[in-house]
Image (spheres, rainbow, N blue to C red):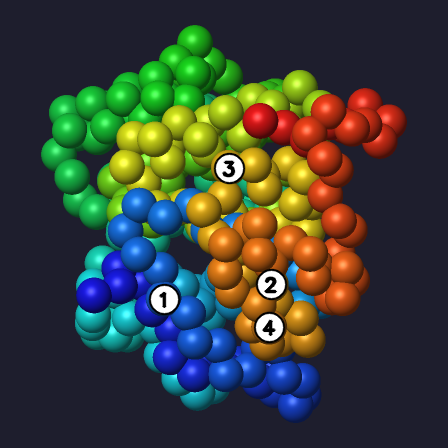
Amino acid sequence: MALLETEDLTHVFPDGTVAIEGINLKVNAGEFLVIAGPNGSGKTVFARHLNGLLRPTRGRVLLDGEPISKDLIGARKKVGLVFQNPESQIVGQTVAEDVAFGPENLNLPADQVATVVEESLAAVGLSRFVTRSPHALSGGEKRKLAIAGILAMNPKIIVFDEPFTGLDYPGVVQVLKEILRLHKNGHTILLITHELEKVLAHAGRLVIMHGGRLVEDGKPETVISRVENYGLRMPLREGEKVGSLTWLK
């Protein structure tokens, strides 16, 4: 049984715009799945259905074989979503308060919250910033803070929506290393991007969305030859450069 599954997932906005239509996707435990597509292809709308932040017009999302609509709080604990803009996830006055927000809302005892915060910040290398304002962090550090906030909820699946947006090269490397570490430690990873050269070397599976539909799904080495058909740039070969960017491994 798939860990996460969508069945005929469709979302139509009130003005009649079809954002996503008929998406059927199965994700197995431990996968590193990349979802790619040009801007406007429906990737973010799709991601926000996976833990119930958006409700489908038609279809459903299953987690461990059960519709997430039965237990949205449970779904949001198991499926963590790191937004494209980490600023939108900052809720605390300090780094520690920000990570504590989720566990506190689960009514965990204070000593348990403190332990979770300490472990989550240590996991992403932000322990020294406990009392710092989140807004004083760099772009890469803010992304790592958002990841720590998700880790504090102990999810099975972590969904990253365009995690490299706005980062310089060192920031990209920093965040990519953290994502790879999370996968190595057993988290199922769904990474949404239109910048395939940054992650393709690590993906076990590549899904392409175009015009709100899922149009390709398979091994990266099989799908990659067709990405330009959907408005995506063919990734660089290892060692090739465009400006300061090299295919990251």
Q: Disc 4 marks which amino acid?
A: Val
Would you say 168 lies left or right of 155 here? right
Residue 37 point in image, percent of width and height: 66, 60
The image quarter containing residue 3 is bottom left
Q: Measure how far apart labels 2 and 4 are at the Cα level.
A: 6 Å
Residue 112 point in image, percent of width and height: 15, 29
Q: Mark 4 highlights which residue? A: 215
Q: Earlier in the sequence, mark 3 or mark 2?
A: 3
Q: Mark 1 highlights which residue? A: 26
Q: Secondary structure at mark 4?
A: strand
- The residue most toward the bottom is 16
Answer few, some or many: residues within 10 Å of disc 3's Cα (few below 14, many 20 plus, some between 14 and 19).
some
Q: Earlier in the sequence, mark 2 or mark 4?
A: 2
Q: Mark 3 highlights which residue? A: 202
Q: Which residue is at 50% across, 17% downward?
A: 132
- The residue most toward the right is 243
Q: Disc 1 marks which amino acid?
A: Lys
Q: Nearer the viewer, residue 207 or 18?
A: 207
Q: Measure how far apart labels 3 and 2 are at the Cα level.
A: 16 Å
Q: Is residue 29 visible?
A: yes
Decide: marks 2, 4 in contact (CB < 8 A)?
A: yes
